[in-house]
Amino acid sequence: MDTVARDSQFLDADEFLRTDQSEFGSAWRYELVRGAIVAHAAPSPEHGVILGNLAREIGNRLRDHVECRSEVGSGAVPQYEQRHTARIPDAMIRCGKQPRVLFEVVSPSELRHKRQWDQKRSDLQAVEGMHEIVEIFQDEMLAHAYRRQGDGWTFEWVAGPDAALELRSVGISVPLAALYERVTPQEA
């Protein structure tokens, strides 16, 4: 992740989300983080396969759900940072006008920046209407599920080919094996 320089024109989250991202440069994707435009490199093939599988599985399970839909690459703005931060999760489930479940596919390089990753999770937890955040690990069949409970968050570790990711806020379940279908295992 690199911060992108931009002229002195201030962007708020709403303006950032309306702006054609090609104005910021040639990176794959950008986020607005505390007023700074941050560039992200293109995902690896494994990241792309997991994200494709996730979109298919969630979309299929929400087919008859009237209120909720699956989205890929849409913006999410934290309530407390409305003017300065706009995160772009890998995927989400939006119910009505608000995101309800956010998904991030986590690469090994992102794990090396724990402080930035923790801040991103905190920003996502502050999105209005947010009930669940799921981190899906690229290099092992593992997901971390964070769920809103009252004023706090609970954590659940979901791992292995027989495990299922329960998305309680929308009443669906997705087998982890389906998310990792056709993902090439990493060499030890």
Image (spheres, grey):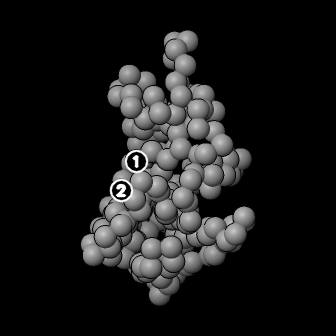
Quadrant for residue 180, please give it: bottom left
169 displayed left or right of 151: left
Q: Secondary structure at mark 1?
A: loop
Task: Give me the disc on residue 8.
Answer: none
| Crowding near the residue tagged with mark 2, few <14, some 14–19, many ≥20 C-alpha atoms within 10 Å | some
Q: Which residue occupies 53% across, 28% down?
A: 12
Q: Quadrant of the N terminus?
A: top right
Residue under the image location 56 percent in, 53 percent down: 128
Residue position marked by numbered label 1 in the rendering: 74
Q: Amino acid at mark 2?
A: Glu
Verify CB contact (< 8 Å) between mark 2 and mark 1.
yes
The quadrant the C terminus occupies is bottom right
In the image, 174 versus 75, the foreground residue is: 75
Q: Where does residue 15 sit, x and y in percent of width and height?
A: 45, 28
Q: Position of residue 47 (x, y in %)?
A: 41, 57
Q: Which residue is mark 2?
A: 71
Name the one closer to the observer, 26 or 89: 89
The number of numbered badges drawn on the structure is 2
Secondary structure, mark 2, is strand
Q: CA distance from mark 2 to mark 1?
A: 6 Å
* Residue farthest bottom in this picture: 162
- What residue type is disc 1 on? Ser
Q: Residues within 10 Å of mark 1 (few under 14, many from 20)?
A: some
Tell me which residue sits at (39%, 37%) in the image: 28
Residue 23 horizontal/vertical position (percent) = 38, 22
User: What residue sits 32% from the left and 73% below the top?
Assistant: 65
